[in-house]
Amino acid sequence: MKLKSFAAAVALVLSAPAMAATCTGGGGLGTLGPPGSSFFGESFSRAGSYLDCYSFSLSSAADSFGGVIELDAWLNKLDIDVTGVSLFSGTSSVGQATGSLVGADYTPGYFSFGSLAAGAYTLAVASTVGRDAGLWNAPVGYLGLLSTSRATVASPAPEPETYAMMLIGLVGIGAMVRRRKQS
């Protein structure tokens, strides 16, 4: 099963930047501030590859973060692997292609996308549902959370060159004071 997950992740990595994908499910999450959060998820009752798209908008610059957990019953005939989470600009719905890629994270347990401008975005969750030898045919799925916070602005910090110039200036002032005392 690990080989399937790895192969799906590699395929997603190689194909995501090259072309837009078509959404197979999902929905709208509304305006997520910042700050704001929203839950999302999907369930599946048959094997296949899925790309669920969740559209949302930001009213001002933000950083976004969240996570996805797989809901997979023990000894089930179906098995789900969430292979990646991608963020696209613009909105998309079922049957539509995604916009241009903003970022991708292939560790969906926790993901983050920073420095987002105000506007519309689509969070795309890629998953693969396969068949296993199990005892029953219960649906599988995933549950996720997407949160936003105000964009962090790096505080200006002095560079090492600044300290060096300040030290040279202090040495110069000290030398000048010492020279005046000697005269």
Image (cartoon, rainbow, N blue to C red):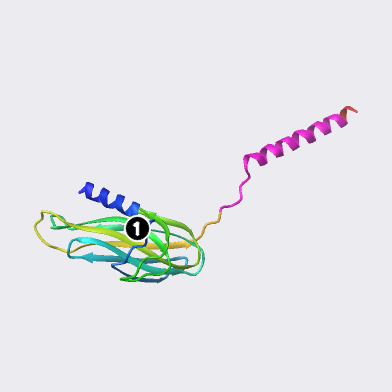
Residue 17 lies, with reference to residue 169, above or below; the image says below
Q: Nearer the viewer, residue 8 or 156?
A: 8
Magenta range: 154-180
Image coords of residue 16 (percent x, y)? 36, 56
The crowding category of the residue bearing disc 1, from other C-alpha atoms within 10 Å (few below 14, some 14 to 19, many at least 20), is: many
Image coords of residue 117 (percent x, y)? 50, 63
Q: Residue at x 85, y 29 (%)?
A: 179
Q: Amino acid at mark 1?
A: Val
Q: Residue at x 51, y 67 (%)?
A: 60
Residue 125 location, quadrant = bottom left
Residue 44 location, quadrant = bottom left
Residue 132 lies, with reference to residue 44, above or below; the image says above
Disc tally is 1
Residue 166 lies, with reference to residue 48, above or below; the image says above
Q: Residue at x 41, y 62 (%)?
A: 88
| Pointer 1 residue | 85
Q: Nearer the viewer, residue 158 or 128?
A: 128
Image coords of residue 149 (percent x, y)? 47, 61
Say if the magenta span includes residue 3. no
Q: Residue at x 88, y 27 (%)?
A: 182
Residue 42 location, quadrant = bottom left
Q: Residue furthest right?
A: 183
Q: Nearer the viewer, residue 59 or 101?
A: 101
Q: Residue furthest top?
A: 182
Q: Is residue 84 left or right of residue 167?
A: left
Q: Which quadrant, please, contains the C terminus? A: top right
Res. 102 in view: yes
Res. 109 in view: no
Q: Is residue 45 left or right of residue 54?
A: left
Q: Is residue 172 left or right of residue 160?
A: right
Image coords of residue 163 (percent x, y)? 66, 39
Please identify the dominant SS of the magenta region. helix
